[in-house]
Image: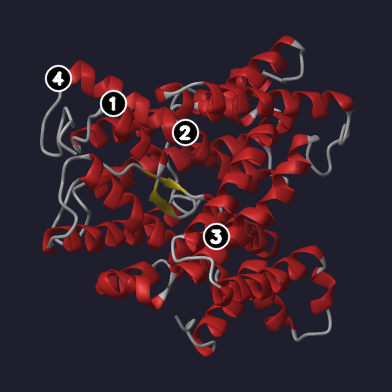
Amino acid sequence: MSDVFYKLEDTPPLKLLIILGIQHVLAMFVGLITPPIIIAATLGISTEDKAFLISMALIASGITTFMQVKRWGPLGSGLLGVQGTSFTFVPAAISTGLAGGIPLICGMTIAAAPVELLLSRFVKRAGKIFPPVVMGTVVMLIGLSLIRVGITDLVGGIGSEDFGSIHNILLGLFVLIIIIIINQFTNGILRVGAVGIGLLAGYIVSALLGSIDFSPISEAGWITIPVPLKYGIKFDFAYILPWIFAYLVSSIETMGDLTASAQNSGEKVDTPLHTERLSGGLVADALGSMLAGFLNSMPNTTFSQNNGVILVTKAGARRIGYAAGTILIILGLVPKFSAIISVMPRSVLGGATIALFGFVAISGLKIIMSQGLTDRNLFILSISLALGLGIIYEPSVLDQLPETLKKIFSSGMVTGGMTSVILNLVIPEDRS
């Protein structure tokens, strides 16, 4: 891009650097805090522990952002890529967490991360090994499986006393409508931050209606100290496949995000240097995710929302990533900030996530369409979705299987993903 105002190695003035860093944090903030909130709600942990998980997610995001934007030998891409926990890992974390809690989530986060280290050695072949029809199918299954989480949260969350109440439904729909209006009728930074604005509006309305208990905020301290593996660590390799699939999808997303970041920053992407950057980006993803696991958080990857900010601001300097990373770490070190987020009503969160998870599902379809909706690809997609969603809708069909197989195939992402891999290998290419 010739009209980039601040290119990759430029240094914006400090004041502008901070402003741009804040914009990048705001763009990815909802996507970053939502996974720990969903996991906390699913596992039924306390508000205090939920706030701690949010703090750790922010700190891990800040540290791994530094790892991504600064190249240390084979580590990092040296591009403006802001890191955070991806929705890609939420289905695997939910099934794993229900079996072994936070310790097992941390253990599997660490155990499966070397997948990205391995893939970093085969950057040029990644697209051939995992073609769009396979990756797109898996991404669609991720989004479609999470929609159930979003819709139950929108009406109050399973287990809540007011589940399905008119109050919850109207509040969740209010957030969703705000997001729709901003997304469709505005441009620029406002559109990029549509989900965050919707959440903020819902939070304010909830506070005015007296629907929020603010006592956890007053009880929270001002400084939190990161405690590695605070809840312990466990491993159960019967659950490894969902995590491997999630890391594979994350790797493809990272390469796409970093390529877009390079283009938006005025860099060429058809060079050996760019291949090295992609490889370094995957190494940063892998090591950053292992670090996140030790910090009681989930895997970290690049966020595509930040490429929208680069386009809008015309500033692609990687030093902006240092500012964003610093802001994320500071926010994570302040428990009161995490407590403010932790008391958010689930119906407010559900109004936002139902939109986000729909976007995830459609992004999977767009990945497949990039290769063309041929008869072959449609057949692979149809069978894979049918089996994957079938497991999600009726998990009892696995009740007679041995426990290990039941754990493996209880994930619709694994069942559908493996189906797409096998069909892609055995079905001949379309003849033209």
Q: Is residue 292 left or right of residue 408?
A: left
Judging depth in this view, the residue of 398 and 10 nearest the camera is: 10
Residue 287, picture quadrant: bottom left
Q: How many marks?
A: 4
Identify the residue at image location x=64%, y=73%: 384
The residue at which mark 1 appears reads as 313
Check residue 13 in the rendering and tell me which mark sits there, or answer none: 4
Identify the residue at image location x=14%, y=20%: 13
Answer whether labels 2 and 4 touch (C-beta < 8 Å).
Answer: no
Q: Is residue 216 left or right of residue 138?
A: right
Other residues around mark 2 within 10 Å, as few (<14) / some (14–19) / many (≥20): some
Identify the residue at image location x=58%, y=20%: 200
Foreground label between 2 and 3 = 3
The residue at which mark 2 appears reads as 29
Q: Earlier in the sequence, mark 2 or mark 1?
A: 2
Quarter holding the C terminus? Answer: bottom left
Other residues around mark 1 within 10 Å, as few (<14) / some (14–19) / many (≥20): some
The residue at which mark 3 appears reads as 139
Where is residue 281 drawn, in percent x and y?
A: 27, 57
